[in-house]
Image (cartoon, helix red, strand yellow):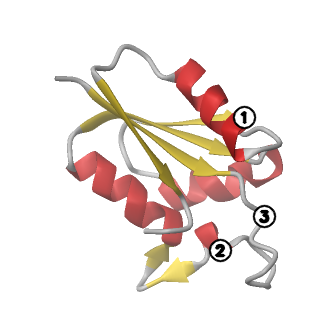
Amino acid sequence: MKLAAIIVAGGRGERVGGEIPKQYKILLGRPVIAWSVLAFAEAGAAEIVIACVPEHAELCRDATSGIAGVRLVDGGVTRTASVRAALAAVGDADAILIHDAARP
């Protein structure tokens, strides 16, 4: 069974405050988003597609560097649009899991 994962990381994290969105802030030594990406990788996801805001792509790449199978796509204006963009980018998979980047 080929497992794929989608992580929606399009939020701007404005309610949390600070210079970067909460999914890229450090939690117990690693970026928040990395916790979810690593969990999917360790669970056997062959492909992990992250839908992120284009202007945060570098933050996302830095937060997930070194994790195999990660690919970024531009997120949409809404969460639904981001999920659709990521679904369109996922290759052949028997199951696709969808998760939010800011809730590890």
Q: Are marks 1 and 3 in contact (CB under 8 Å)?
A: no
**Three-letter code, disc 3:** Arg
Q: Is residue 70 above or below residue 91?
A: below
Between the C-alphas of marks 1 and 3, the distance is 15 Å
Q: Is residue 89 above or below residue 19?
A: above
Q: Residue furthest top?
A: 92
Q: Is residue 2 left or right of residue 6?
A: left
Identify the mark nearer the N-term, 1 or 3. Answer: 3
Between the C-alphas of marks 1 and 2, the distance is 20 Å
Residue 26: mark in rendering: none
Secondary structure of the residue carrying numbered label 2: helix
Residue 26's spot in the image, x, y percent? 54, 80
Residue tagged by mark 1? 81
Residue 40's spot in the image, x, y percent? 31, 49
Q: Is residue 63 above or below residue 51?
A: below
Residue tagged by mark 2? 22
Residue tagged by mark 3? 12
At horizontal 41% and vertical 51% (from top left) the residue drawn is 66
Secondary structure of the residue carrying numbered label 3: loop
Where, by quadrant of the figure, is residue 44 drawn?
A: top left
Foreground residue among 68 and 99: 99
Where, by quadrant of the figure, is residue 5 drawn?
A: top left
At horizontal 51% and vertical 63% (from top left) the residue drawn is 33
Between the C-alphas of marks 2 and 3, the distance is 8 Å
Quadrant including the N terminus? top left
Q: Nearer the viewer, mark 1 or mark 2?
A: 1
Residue 26 shows up from this direction: yes
Q: Nearer the viewer, mark 1 or mark 3?
A: 1
Identify the mark nearer the N-term, 2 or 3. Answer: 3
Q: Residue furthest left?
A: 1
Q: Is residue 32 left or right of residue 93?
A: right
Secondary structure of the residue carrying numbered label 1: helix
